[in-house]
């Protein structure tokens, strides 16, 4: 059995990495790392590989010494080169790290959640004795700064005082990271766990929050200190040796050959849309249209990069607004399980980073600024399901537009300037401000979200909870069936000789069984996102254009509102792409455009029609439709006229009666008066008497 030594590593490098080392020498010191694949070490000597894993400290030391002393054809010395080992055969889940892993060479994968600024760290501190001017060099370890106990100079030997000499000290760049388990490894809403990582020199500053990484290093433990003193508990920190940034386009989800065959079979099934829809939240009754939209969101349109550097998003954003208890949260929870890289969170925010990202100075950074990724960054290339979106923090509100449209999040605060990627689809849920939804009021008024943000959604659905005998009966029966099936299963599981057969349970479960199992559907989606890139056919293109122009034409009539904007056209295209993907089609056909026009119209009818039934895009884009704007104009005219007649402020009742003659209802008048008052266009002179400002 060979034992790690300086010589052994030299032999290894000569045999496997000669060219790589020569390359390194040529670009040294810009490049300072030799990236070594673990499998090469194993090929060279399996025992050396084992030893590296079990006793990384001496073995890595040998490797680093060997590379520095190797003979080079070019006349440089690569004193500060590092050996960075990648490709460890085994990755340990962060939640499975145990004390047995301490001081071992390990590899973890996950998402970068936080990263501090890159700042210098002293590794050898030079101290000048203030009495005799002798300089004592003190190597620094992790954590605490060590000062000399007494002057090294035998003649002096006094206890200082000492002064740090910056020019003679040695510094390297350092950064602290926090990795979070990747959402793909989590099942059923588990809270992800994290691990802190220290990196230095050329590893510092190469990753950003939201990046997907594999980090290898030596696991260290640090004793916790409490106010009472040292604790018996230890914290874990990974001493980073190498970082591999994973290509996010490349899904981690593995799909076997048999599964691909099954997927292709599904794609040809004429009932595929129905089957997919019935596989989304089967325990929730109804909402076929919403589920169909959610299905298309999961399959997603195609993101395009144009030659001028712009990028058009392919992700479909959907907002569900509605009464409490209509299963919004349940729909979100289901969708996150189906989405490759799904993240579920609440707008009320569980973390300091909220939905987008923040820069903070806190304990983690030990005085350095830390950039922390929020949900939309962590869900990059996936789906972010955000419940109670209306309750998001003010900071998020301002960065959401950019996050949804450009799919980036820019942070410029103190020393930190960064742009993080948020290329994800957003499925949001929001509750009405006043508890219940009023379908006669424009939506912007009822939920606590600015119109500019609402207009970023491709589809908005309103789920109302209006009692109806037929629907209520169906829902009730569906809920009871689901509970009954669950009861049977629980009895069988917990009671011996329950007398309940598996058959019976399967039969009872049928109503709530997805047609395509969640795991399979996830793979189906991942497969299509990787392999299917449909192109629109002429007929389908013409269909979309005609539809759009047809609607726009309605806006040409005198006095008509603007019915749709280009935003809706883009939504249609994205959805049509997704629709073609569902059946693994490489072309977008008239079938797809029919489907998506139906869905978009259904959404627009719910949220963009004024009281006369006309479509008005301003209801979403501006938060107020044309008809309401017109009424406000009329109302102001009335007040102005009355004001002239009275030659003073006008009583409310007179305004109301005059407005009613013009066909504006009393409620509306009172409402608009309030509004005009808040924006300062009218004044309440005395009680219930108003005048124009
Ligand atoms: P919300 O988030 O809209 O307030 P929830 O998702 O918390 O509502 O749903 C409340 C409960 O009502 C859930 O347990 C859900 O399963 C049930 N529920 C509501 N509507 C339906 C439905 N259409 N089918 C089945 N269950 C429903
Ligand atoms: Mg809810």
Image (cartoon, grey):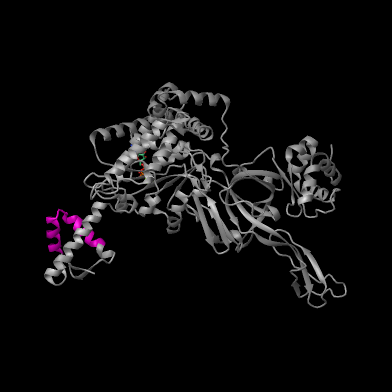
Q: Is residue 283 visible?
A: no
Which residue sits at x=78%, y=50%?
26
Where is residue 678? Give x, y as percent.
28, 64
Where is residue 503? Give x, y as percent.
43, 21
Which residue sits at x=80%, y=53%?
78
Location of the N terminus by quadrant is top right
Q: Which residues are magenta?
A: 652-675
Along the horizontal axis of the image, is 50 left or right of 246? Answer: right
Which residue sits at x=69%, y=59%?
173
* Magenta stretch contains residue 670: yes
* Magenta stretch contains residue 383: no
Q: Main secondary structure of the magenta part?
A: helix
Which residue sits at x=35%, y=36%?
597
Where is residue 148? Give x, y as percent.
77, 68
Q: How many numbered circles are shown?
A: 0
In the rendered image, the residue lying farthest to the bottom is: 131
């Amino acid at each position: 059995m060979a034992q790690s030594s300086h010589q052994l590593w030299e032999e290894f490098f000569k045999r496997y990495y000669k060219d790589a080392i020569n390359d390194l020498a040529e670009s040294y010191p810009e490049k300072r790392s030799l990236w070594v694949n673990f499998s090469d070490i194993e090929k060279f000597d399996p025992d050396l590989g084992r030893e590296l894993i079990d006793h990384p400290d001496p073995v890595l030391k040998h490797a680093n010494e060997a590379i520095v002393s190797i003979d080079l054809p070019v006349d440089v010395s690569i004193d500060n080169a590092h050996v960075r080992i990648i490709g460890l055969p085994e990755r340990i889940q962060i939640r499975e790290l145990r004390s047995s892993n301490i001081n071992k060479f390990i590899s973890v994968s996950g998402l970068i959640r936080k990263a501090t600024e890159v700042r210098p760290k002293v590794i050898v501190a030079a101290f000048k004795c203030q009495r005799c001017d002798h300089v004592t060099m003190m190597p620094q370890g992790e954590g605490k700064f060590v000062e000399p106990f007494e002057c090294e100079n035998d003649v002096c030997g006094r206890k200082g005082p000492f002064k740090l000499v910056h020019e003679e000290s040695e510094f390297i760049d350092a950064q602290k990271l926090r990795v979070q388990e990747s959402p793909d490894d989590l099942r059923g809403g588990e809270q992800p766990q994290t691990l802190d990582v220290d990196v230095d020199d050329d590893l510092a500053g190469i990753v950003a929050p939201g990046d997907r990484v594999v980090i290898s290093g030596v696991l260290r433990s640090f004793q916790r200190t409490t106010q009472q003193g040292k604790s018996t508990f230890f914290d874990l920190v990974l001493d980073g040796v190498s970082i591999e940034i994973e290509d996010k386009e490349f899904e981690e989800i593995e799909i076997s050959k048999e599964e691909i065959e099954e997927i292709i079979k599904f794609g040809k099934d004429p009932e595929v849309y129905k089957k997919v829809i019935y596989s989304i939240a089967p325990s929730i009754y109804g909402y076929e249209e919403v589920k169909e939209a959610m299905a298309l969101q999961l399959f997603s349109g195609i993101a395009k990069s144009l030659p001028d550097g712009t990028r058009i998003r392919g992700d479909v954003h959907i907002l569900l607004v509605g009464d409490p208890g209509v299963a919004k949260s349940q729909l979100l929870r289901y969708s996150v399980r189906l989405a490759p890289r799904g993240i579920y969170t609440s707008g009320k925010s569980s973390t300091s980073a909220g939905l987008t990202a923040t820069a903070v100075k806190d304990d983690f950074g030990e005085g350095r600024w830390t950039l922390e990724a929020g949900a939309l960054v962590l869900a990059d290339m996936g789906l972010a399901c955000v419940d109670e979106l209306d309750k998001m923090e003010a900071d998020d509100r301002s960065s959401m537009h950019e996050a949804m449209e450009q799919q980036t999040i820019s942070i410029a605060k103190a020393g930190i300037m960064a742009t993080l990627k948020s290329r994800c689809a957003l499925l949001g849920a929001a509750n009405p401000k006043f508890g219940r939804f009023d379908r006669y009021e424009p939506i912007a008024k009822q939920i606590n979200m600015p119109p500019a943000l609402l207009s970023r959604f491709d589809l908005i659905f309103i789920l109302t909870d209006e009692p109806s005998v037929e629907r209520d009966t169906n829902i009730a029966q569906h809920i009871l069936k689901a509970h009954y099936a669950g009861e049977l299963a629980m009895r069988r599981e917990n009671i011996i000789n329950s007398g309940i057969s598996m058959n019976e349970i399967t039969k009872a479960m049928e109503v709530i069984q997805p047609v395509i199992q969640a795991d399979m559907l996830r793979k189906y989606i991942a497969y299509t996102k990787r392999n299917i890139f449909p192109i629109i056919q002429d007929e389908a293109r013409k269909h979309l254009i005609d539809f759009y122009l047809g609607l726009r034409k309605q806006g040409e009539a005198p006095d008509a509102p603007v019915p749709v904007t280009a935003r809706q056209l883009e939504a249609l295209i994205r959805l049509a792409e997704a629709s073609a993907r569902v059946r693994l089609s490489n072309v977008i056909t008239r079938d797809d455009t029919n489907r998506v026009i139906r869905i978009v119209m259904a959404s627009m009818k719910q949220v963009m029609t004024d009281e006369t039934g006309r479509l008005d895009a301003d209801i979403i884009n501006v938060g107020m439709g044309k008809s309401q704007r017109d009424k406000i104009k009329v109302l102001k005219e009335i007040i102005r006229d009355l004001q002239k007649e009275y030659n003073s402020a006008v009583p409310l009742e007179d305004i109301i009666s005059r407005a009613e003659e013009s066909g504006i209802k009393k409620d509306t008048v009172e409402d608009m008066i309030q509004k005009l008052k808040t924006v300062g266009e009218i004044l309440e002179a005395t009680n219930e008497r108003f005048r124009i400002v």
